[in-house]
Image (cartoon, grey):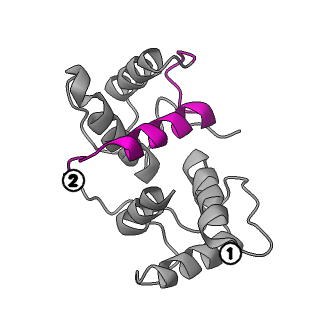
């Protein structure tokens, strides 16, 4: 099982920070810097989220917390646009919870045959599924999960 924890970096953390900012702004929390670095402030925001949503409080993003955050984000009526569009990406060689979740989302939305193994390892089959998804969504098919592809996947699940 993959997790996102203190010290993690990358697009998955940046997106997590964005989602938490949107979800927790009603609670009056100080917005997180959406920098893609899972530091103390991000960990504290995760703990607050977990507490408010009745999840185990460990400050770690595992599947249960991730799924809850995505569901909460998708339930928002008018999230504010992201302010920090960095060049972080998920591509061949990337690993972790974000890749595992993206593989599951691609299985649901693309229905590749056979389904992708949701192992958290971004390999050639995942790249091909991303290209297929991007083509179907009129996104430049580069096989890389950047902001546009990520946002489209999340909006459709």
Give how far apart the Cα atoms at labels 1 and 2 are: 31 Å
Residue at 44 percent across and 44 percent down: it is 9
Stretch of the chain drawn in magenta: 56-82
Residue at the farthest right position: 114
> x and y percent of residue 50 in the render?
47, 21
Residue ID for mark 1: 124
- Viewed as shown, does residue 41 lie left or right of 99? left
> x and y percent of residue 75 in the render?
38, 42
In the displayed structure, would residue 54 be above or below residue 99?
above
Residue 95 visible in image: no
Q: Earlier in the sequence, mark 1 or mark 2?
A: 2
Residue ID for mark 2: 81
Q: Is 88 inside the magenta-drawn segment?
A: no
Q: Is 70 inside the magenta-drawn segment?
A: yes
Q: Quadrant of the N terminus?
A: top right
> x and y percent of residue 79 in the render?
25, 46
- Viewed as shown, does residue 36 lie left or right of 132? left
Question: The residue tagged with tag 1: helix, strand or loop?
Answer: helix
In the displayed structure, would residue 153 be above or below residue 27?
below
């Amino acid at each position: 099982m993959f997790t996102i924890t203190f010290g993690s970096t990358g697009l998955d953390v940046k997106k997590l920070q964005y989602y938490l900012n949107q979800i927790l702004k009603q609670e009056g929390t100080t917005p997180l810097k959406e920098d893609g670095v899972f530091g103390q402030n991000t960990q504290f925001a995760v703990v607050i989220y977990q507490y408010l949503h009745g999840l185990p409080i460990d400050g770690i993003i595992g599947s249960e917390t991730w799924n809850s955050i995505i569901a909460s984000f998708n339930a928002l009526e008018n999230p504010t646009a992201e302010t920090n569009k960095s060049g972080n990406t998920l591509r061949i060689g990337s690993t972790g919870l974000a890749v595992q979740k993206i593989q599951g989302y691609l299985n649901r939305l693309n229905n590749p045959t056979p389904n992708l193994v949701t192992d958290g390892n971004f390999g050639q089959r995942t790249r091909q599924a991303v290209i297929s998804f991007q083509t179907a969504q009129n996104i430049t098919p580069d096989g890389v999960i950047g902001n546009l592809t990520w946002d489209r996947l999340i909006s459709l699940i």
